[in-house]
C-alpha cells in the first residue's frame, strides 16, 4: 500500500504539478497528451458524452433515410446516383458480409422516396428530420465547448442546408477523383514496378486516415458556435480520424467473430451490430471534439474537476477585476476585452468569467457585442456606476431563490445584521465609481496595453489569446 501511495505521489509531481504555461518543447506536449488521456477517461466515467452519443444513435436511425433521400435526389440531378452505394459500403464495411443486407434495404427505401409526390407537409417533415440530426451534432459540440448561445434559426437553416447541398457534391468529387486515379494507366503501370508498387500500396493504406482526419478537422472547426483555432481543430481531427479508421478495422474483426451475437439474436444480429457501430462512431466524434477543446483550453487540464468552486468573496473580487479592466480599456480607447482575453489576463476560469459577465449584462452594466457575444463593453456611463452597484449585481440571484424562513424572528435578526454590513461596506467604498477604480490603475495598465483608436470600437475584435 505504501508503495502504491508513493508511486501515486510521484506521478502527481510529474504529471499534474508542473504549470503548462512555463513548460516548453516536447515535455509540454507529452504532459498535454497524458493529461488529455486522463481527462477523456474522466469524461467517459462521468457519462455525459456517452449518453449524448446514445441520443445521436436514435436520431441517426430516424433521420438516415431522409438524409440519404435528399443526397440521392441531388446526386441523381447530376446523373451520378450510383455513388450512394459505394459510400454506404465504405461506412458500413465494419459490419462484415451482413452489411450488404442493410445497404440493399436502405437503397430500396431511398429509391422509393419520391420527393415530388410527398406534398408540402411531407417535404417539410423530410427536411426537418434531416436538420434535427445536424442540430443534435451541433448541440453536442456546443456542450463540449461550453457554448451557451446556439445558432439562430436563420443561421441554422442556411448553414445546415449548405452542408446538405455541399456534402453530396464533395462525395461526388471524391468518388470521381478516386475513380480517375485508380483507372489511370500511369498509376497502373507504376503499381507493378518496385519500389513504386509498395509505395502506392502504403499510400493507399494511409490515405483513409488522412481523408477522415481532414473531414473531422473541418467538422470541429465549423460546427461549434464559437471561435475554434485551426491547430486544436487539426489535433482533434487527427485523433478522431485515426481512431475511427482503426476502430473500423477492429470492429470488422469483431463482427466477423461475433458468434455469440448471431446465436442470441439470429437474424437481428446485424441490426445490433449496426447500433453498436453507430454508437462507437458518435463516441469517436464527440471525444475528438473534446480533444480539440482541451487543446485550445489547456488550463482545464487539471487533476481536480474544472472549474474549481468559486466562493462568494472571490466572486466579488473577480467581478471588480473584470469591471476595472473593461472600464480602463474603455477610457484609454483600446481594443475591447473579450471573455477569453479576460480569462487569460486574470488567470481565471472561462466559466467563471462568463457567469459574471452574464450577470453584469443582465444588470445593464455591460453589453455583449460581436458575432458570438464575447466582446464586453460598458453599457452605462462608468462615472455613474458605483462599485457597490457592481457588487450588488453579482451578489443578487433570482427573487424566487431568496429563502423565506417560517421563523420570522430569525429572519429579522439575520437581515438586520446583513443591512449593517452593507452600510459599513458602502461607507468604506466612499461612493466611489467604476471610473474612479479604473483611473486608479490606468497609469500602469495603459502603458502595457495595445492602444487602438476609439473609432475601431465599431468593429470590435472577437478573437484573443484563448481563441474565443
Image (spheres, rainbow, N blue to C red):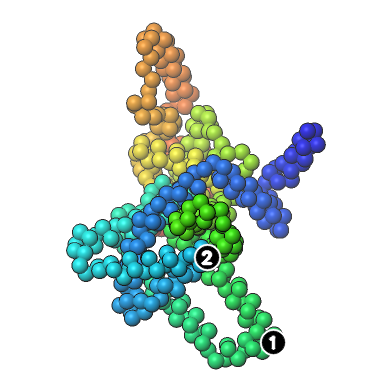
Choose top left, top right, bottom left or bottom right for residue 60: bottom left
Alpha carbons under labels 1 and 2: distance apart: 32 Å
Residue lying at the far top in this picture: please name it: 409
Identified at 53% across, 33% down, the residue is 310
Camera-side residue of 203 and 36: 203
Looking at the image, which residue is at 58% across and 88% down? 187
Residue 255: x and y in percent read 55, 60
Along the horizontal axis of the image, is 312 left or right of 18? left
Q: Position of residue 225 (x, y in %)?
A: 42, 54
Q: Of residues 336 and 140, which is closer to you in this image?
A: 140
Work out whether residue 416 or residue 388 is closer to the camera in this orientation and state it: 416
Residue 400 higher or lower than 111, as above or below: above
Q: Is 6 drawn above or below residue 415 in the view shown?
A: below
Tell me which corner region of the image, top left, top right, bottom left or bottom right, holds residue 327.
top left
- Residue 307 location (% of width, % of height): 54, 39
- Left or right, 313 with reference to 456: right
Locate residue 175: give its quadrant.
bottom left
Q: Position of residue 250 (x, y in %)?
A: 60, 61
Residue 455 showing in the rendered view: no
> Taking 222 as reference, is 41 left or right?
right
Viewer-nearest residue: 348 or 125: 125
Near mark 1 (Cα within 10 A), the count class, few <14, some 14-19 or many ≥20, is few
Q: Which residue is mark 1?
A: 194
Instruction: Return the disc, 1 or 2, that comes first in the chain's sequence.
Output: 2
Residue shown at 43%/13% (left/top)?
414
Q: Residues within 10 Å of mark 2 (few under 14, many from 20)?
A: some
- The circle on residue 407 is none
> In percent of the image, x 45 and y 81: which residue is there?
176
Report the residue marked by disc 2. 96
Q: Considering only vertical position in the picture, is 139 above or below 324?
A: below
Secondary structure under tag 2 reads helix
Amino acid at each position: 500500500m505504501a508503495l502504491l501511495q508513493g508511486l501515486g505521489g510521484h506521478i502527481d509531481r510529474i504529471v499534474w504539478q508542473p504549470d503548462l504555461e512555463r513548460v516548453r518543447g516536447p515535455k509540454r506536449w507529452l504532459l498535454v497528451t497524458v493529461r488529455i488521456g486522463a481527462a477523456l477517461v474522466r469524461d467517459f466515467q462521468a457519462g455525459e458524452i456517452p449518453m449524448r452519443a446514445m441520443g445521436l444513435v436514435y436520431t441517426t436511425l430516424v433521420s438516415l433515410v431522409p438524409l440519404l433521400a435528399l443526397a440521392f435526389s441531388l446526386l441523381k440531378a447530376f446523373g451520378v446516383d450510383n455513388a450512394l452505394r459505394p459510400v454506404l459500403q465504405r461506412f458500413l464495411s465494419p459490419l462484415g458480409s451482413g452489411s450488404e443486407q442493410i445497404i440493399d434495404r436502405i437503397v430500396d427505401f431511398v429509391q422509393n422516396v419520391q420527393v415530388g409526390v410527398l406534398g408540402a407537409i411531407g417535404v417539410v417533415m423530410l427536411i426537418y428530420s434531416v436538420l434535427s440530426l445536424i442540430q443534435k451534432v451541433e448541440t453536442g459540440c456546443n456542450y463540449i465547448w461550453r457554448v451557451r448561445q446556439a445558432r439562430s434559426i436563420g443561421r441554422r437553416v442556411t448553414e445546415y442546408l449548405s452542408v446538405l447541398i455541399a456534402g453530396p457534391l464533395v462525395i461526388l468529387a471524391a468518388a470521381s477523383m478516386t475513380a480517375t486515379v485508380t483507372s489511370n494507366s500511369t498509376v497502373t503501370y507504376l503499381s507493378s514496378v518496385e519500389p513504386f508498387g509498395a509505395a502506392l500500396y502504403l499510400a493507399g493504406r494511409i490515405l483513409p486516415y488522412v481523408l477522415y482526419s481532414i473531414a473531422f478537422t473541418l467538422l470541429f472547426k465549423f460546427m461549434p458556435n464559437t471561435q475554434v483555432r485551426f491547430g486544436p481543430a487539426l489535433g482533434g481531427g487527427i485523433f478522431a480520424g485515426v481512431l475511427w479508421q482503426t476502430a473500423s478495422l477492429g470492429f470488422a474483426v469483431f463482427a466477423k467473430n461475433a458468434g455469440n451475437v448471431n446465436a442470441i439474436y439470429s437474424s437481428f444480429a446485424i441490426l445490433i451490430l449496426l447500433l453498436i457501430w453507430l454508437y462507437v462512431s458518435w463516441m469517436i466524434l464527440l471525444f475528438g471534439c473534446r480533444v480539440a477543446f482541451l487543446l485550445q483550453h489547456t488550463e482545464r487540464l487539471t487533476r481536480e474537476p474544472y472549474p474549481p468552486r468559486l466562493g462568494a468573496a472571490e466572486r466579488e473580487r473577480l467581478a471588480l477585476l473584470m469591471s476595472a479592466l473593461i472600464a480602463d480599456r474603455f477610457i484609454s480607447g483600446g481594443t475591447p476585452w473579450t471573455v477569453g482575453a479576460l480569462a487569460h489576463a486574470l488567470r481565471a476560469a472561462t466559466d467563471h468569467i462568463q457567469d459574471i459577465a452574464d450577470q453584469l449584462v443582465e444588470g445593464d452594466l455591460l453589453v455583449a457585442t460581436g458575432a458570438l457575444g464575447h466582446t464586453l463593453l460598458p453599457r452605462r456611463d462608468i462615472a455613474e456606476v458605483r462599485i457597490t452597484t457592481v457588487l450588488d449585481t453579482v451578489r443578487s440571484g433570482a427573487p424566487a431563490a431568496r429563502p423565506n424562513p417560517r421563523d420570522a424572528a430569525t429572519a429579522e435578526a439575520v437581515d438586520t445584521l446583513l443591512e449593517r454590513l452593507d452600510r459599513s461596506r458602502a461607507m468604506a467604498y466612499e461612493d466611489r465609481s467604476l471610473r474612479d477604480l479604473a483611473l486608479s490603475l490606468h497609469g500602469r495598465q495603459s502603458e502595457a496595453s495595445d492602444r487602438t483608436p476609439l473609432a475601431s470600437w465599431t468593429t470590435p475584435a472577437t478573437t484573443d489569446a484563448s481563441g474565443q
